[in-house]
Image (cartoon, rainbow, N blue to C red):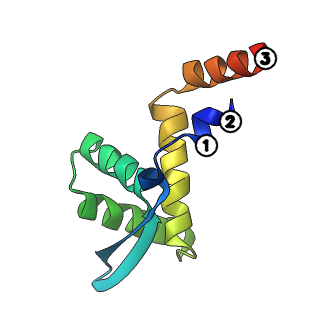
Amino acid sequence: MCQIFAGQAPERYSGETRSIRLGGHVTSVRLETAYWEILEEVSAAQGMALSKFLTTLHDEVLDLRGEVQNFASLLRCACLTYVEEVRGNSDRIAALKIEAQVA
């Protein structure tokens, strides 16, 4: 089973830094390429450019929590939420569990 995870291309988990504007300030966010790909998919699904989606998400967290302590971590967790809830990866997770039991 670990080959599924260990065998992925190193480009997927290499870090990529992007400059973004949040609240009128330019900042940079460093995430693994795989997360940027998911964020681009999410923003397209929302009908927004990635920069607009990130700004909207940041503003909504500010409204709800009053601050954004770790935006990069928030983005990673948003990607996980998208994969779990929107993509409905339950079939793939079930297949991985079956594969692990057979091995």
Q: Quadrant of the C terminus?
A: top right
Residue at 62% across, 25% down: 93
Q: Which residue is mark 3?
A: 101
Q: Which residue is mark 2?
A: 2
Residue at 50% across, 38% down: 83
Residue at 25% across, 62% down: 52
In the image, farthest residue toward the bottom: 25
Q: How far apart, in angstroms, are the residues tagged by discs 1 and 3?
A: 18 Å
* Vertical comparison of 23 with 42: above or below: below
Looking at the picture, tell me which residue is in the foreground, 17 or 7: 7
Quadrant position of residue 53: bottom left
Is 73 positioned to the left or the right of 56 in the image?
right
Q: Which residue is mark 1?
A: 6
Choose mark 3 or mark 2, whichever is in front. Answer: 2
Choose mark 1 or mark 3, whichever is in front. Answer: 1
Tell whether label 2 touches label 1 (CB within 8 Å): yes
SS label for mark 1: helix
Q: How crowded is the residue under tag 2: few (<14 C-alpha within 10 Å), some, or many (20+)? A: few
Please tell me the numbered disc located at residue 82.
none
Is 70 positioned to the left or the right of 17 in the image?
right
User: At label 2, which amino acid type do we have?
Assistant: Cys
User: At label 3, which amino acid type do we have?
Assistant: Gln
SS label for mark 3: helix
* Vertical comparison of 96 with 70: above or below: above
Quadrant position of residue 51: bottom left
Q: How far apart, in angstroms, are the residues tagged by discs 1 and 2?
A: 6 Å
Looking at the picture, tell me which residue is in the foreground, 66 or 16: 16
Q: How crowded is the residue under tag 1: few (<14 C-alpha within 10 Å), some, or many (20+)? A: few
Residue at 47% across, 53% down: 10
Q: How far apart, in angstroms, are the residues tagged by discs 3 and 2?
A: 13 Å
User: At label 1, which amino acid type do we have?
Assistant: Ala
